Amino acid sequence: MMLARRILVTMGVAALAGCTTFSPDGGRGDVERLVADRIGTPARVLTQAGDASAQRTAVEMRLAEVLTAESAVEIALLYQPALQVRLAELGLAEADLVQAGRLRNPVFAYSNKRHADVVEIERAVLVNVAALVMRPLALDIGERRFAQAKLVAAADIVQAAGAVRQAWIRAVAAQERLVYDEQVMGAAEAASELSRRMAEVGNFSKLAQLREHAFYADAAAALARSRHLALTERERLARLLGLPDGGAALRLPPRLPDLPATALEGGTSEQVAMDRRLDVRIASAEAESLARALGLTRATRFVNVLEVGYANTSATGEPRADGYEIELELPLFDFGDAKVARAEIRYRQALAGAADVAVNARSEVREAYSAYRTALDLAKHYRDEIVPLRRRIADEMLLRYNGMLTGVFELLADARVQSATVAASIDATRDFWLAESALQLALAGRSSGAMPTLGRSSPPAAEPAGGH
């Protein structure tokens, strides 16, 4: 009985000394802090069952206003079902941590044997001593894995925020392009009608009239594509926000933000990525966790099962026999070397994977920064050089028209070139903000698998206008 008491007292003290419990927020606060530091805006992730009402209220408040990139990200963090599914992995990791911090249940064994008139009863209570001794190391591994799960959750959120921001950029640019294409369509329709009437009275050649009608037909086709693209980008944004009713009710701003006055410095971008990129930290945490797990594997390679407990035996007509029982798995066939080798191979894989992630991260940052600077230079070139130059040409053409030095269709031909230039300028601004978003993701988040590409938009040469 004394041995039984000692075993039970030891278990009770160990349980009280280190019982692991669930955290109040399930690690959500740490994840939100990691995300907020990388997306530049407060990040609130509602994952609890009682948050549904607060979730709907917060989303409705943001949808009632003009949707900015920041508010779009906030809605996605609150409302996107796919993101909530991925965040559930955080709760599973915490459950594993709590499980690792708790003692294994004792085993009670009982047997009743009858021989003629003799009844033999055996009772035993066994405690897994190996699990108790290795519990601190197992708890440390569980804590590391929970910390790694927080990094993974933060990386998922940062990735989702980047995707939402880019979808918002594309939706706003598509809407801006649609408005401009509608204006071009109106001008093309008026020019086509004017050329038709002039051709009917013999003041315009058939070839010139066909050219104006062809421009009108091209403008109609471009407008149809712009309408579909605007709808597509709105719906894509609505899906990323998790809105079940689609994007029809989204209130987007009329145009993209102005270009920044100065560019980001790229000299320290690689080091910033090494310090802040979540995939680099995840790979490092994985290697550290496996290193600790390798220590546990080596410590338990021979002793897989070691159970100690109190046991007694009683038989009819005889005094009860008290004692203790030890169960030990003997390494006669499996010496644990395969288990250790497997752990060592996984650790080497993790080290190689961490090195590969670091190499890719540096390369992606260099590529993303080049795309960022090129897109910014192109967008500023359109804004400061090409568009103003086309406007000055248009002003000169208008002066010549007022002075009767050129005809109306020469004026319209130049207007067509100017419209193509403005459309290319809108695309260049869109490409810059997409490249800026990709650079921020490359500096802080996780590889998206694709780097931004710059579109090629060049205004077509003006067709010669026909005269009389």
Image (cartoon, rainbow, N blue to C red):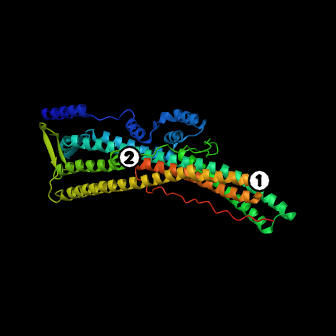
Q: Quadrant of the C terminus?
A: bottom right
Question: Residue 84 location, x and y as percent?
Answer: 47, 43
- In the displayed structure, 345 sits above or below 168; it is below
Please name the amino acid that badge 2 sits on: Val
The crowding category of the residue bearing disc 2, from other C-alpha atoms within 10 Å (few below 14, some 14 to 19, many at least 20), is many
**Left or right of residue 231, residue 429 in this image:** left
Question: Residue 222 location, x and y as percent?
Answer: 67, 58
Q: Quadrant of the N terminus?
A: top left
Which residue is nearer to you in this view: 137 or 28?
28
Disc 1 target residue? 403
Which residue is nearer to you in this view: 57 or 235?
235
Quarter of the rendering containing residue 332: bottom left
Disc 2 target residue? 152
Which residue occupies 23% across, 50% down? 291
Residue 329 shows in the view:
yes
Residue 315 shows in the view:
no
Q: Residue furthest right?
A: 201
Callout 2: helix, strand or loop? helix
Callout 1: helix, strand or loop? loop
Which residue is nearer to you in this view: 354 or 395?
395
Question: Residue 313 location, x and y as percent?
Answer: 15, 40
**Left or right of residue 290, residue 396 in this image:** right
- In the displayed structure, 65 sits above or below 187; it is above
Question: Residue 88 location, x and y as percent?
Answer: 42, 44
Please name the amino acid that badge 1 sits on: Gly
Tag 2 and tag 1, C-beta contact below 8 Å? no
Which residue occupies 57% across, 49% down? 383
Check residue 296 in the rendering and tell me which mark sits there, or answer none: none
The crowding category of the residue bearing disc 1, from other C-alpha atoms within 10 Å (few below 14, some 14 to 19, many at least 20), is few
**Left or right of residue 77, residue 390 in this image:** right
First reached walking from the N terminus: tag 2 or tag 1: 2
**Left or right of residue 214, residue 306 in this image:** left
